[in-house]
Amino acid sequence: MPQFLGEYECKVDAKLRMRLPSLLLKQLNPEEKLRFVINRGFEKCLTLYPIKEWQKITEEIQKLNQFDPNDRKFTRYFYRGATELEADSNDRILLPKRLKEYANIEKEVVIFAYQDRIELWSKEQYDMMFDDEPEDFSDLAAKVMTKMKNNTEE
């Protein structure tokens, strides 16, 4: 599983293309083509998954019970807008218009790469999200990490 890391500022051109930053490209497996699936993320961003990571997620979703209305609803919303992309020879990806509109992306994009995914945010929304930084990040970290520790001990 890749472990992406980084925050990058990019631009979208008039044809809805965005060049992937070279520092991010270095984190991708060089043996694989630059193939991704882009999809709606949470909090009005887009999520870019390397194709192998997308396949892992798809395998997990296929285990859901399609006779359960909540599972069906989740599956439909999760896949809504999912589009396979391949970077061109200039390391650019083409953002689907509907997804670009969903994330309110205009010209400036912030790429936030972490764990196995890459989020694409409108610069304005990304900056606004971090304007609401928790008053005490230390308390938030303690709550989240304690919960995680308790889950691994069970």
Image: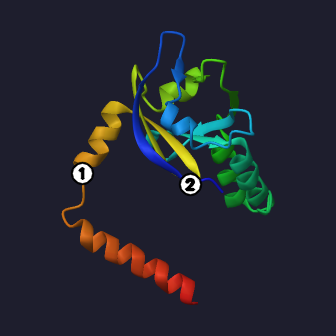
- Where 84 sits versus 94, above or below? below
**Does residue 82 show up?**
no
Residue tagged by mark 2? Answer: 3
**Disc 1 element:** loop
Q: Marks 2 and 1, Cα distance to the nearest angstrom?
A: 26 Å
Residue toward you, 140 or 62: 140
Q: What residue do we see at 51% from left, 31% from top? A: 22
Residue 132: assigned label: 1
- The quarter of the image holding the N terminus is bottom right
Q: At which x and y percent is residue 55?
A: 76, 49
Q: Quadrant of residue 35?
A: top right
**Is 80 placed left or right of 145 in the picture?**
right
Residue 115: assigned label: none
Q: What residue do we see at 20% from left, 67% from top? A: 136
- The quarter of the image holding the C terminus is bottom right
Q: Quadrant of residue 112?
A: top left
Report crowding for label 2: few under 14, some 14 to 19, many 20 or more residues within 10 A (C-alpha).
few
Going by the numbered disc 2, the residue's amino acid type is: Gln
Residue toward you, 102 or 120: 120
Count the labels in the image: 2
Outermost top residue: 14
**Is 48 placed left or right of 149 in the picture?**
right
- Where 137 sits versus 132, above or below? below
Q: At which x and y percent is residue 104?
A: 42, 28
Q: At which x and y percent is residue 9?
A: 38, 31
Report crowding for label 1: few under 14, some 14 to 19, many 20 or more residues within 10 A (C-alpha).
few
Q: Earlier in the sequence, mark 2 or mark 1?
A: 2
- Where 62 sits versus 11, above or below? below
Going by the numbered disc 1, the residue's amino acid type is: Asp
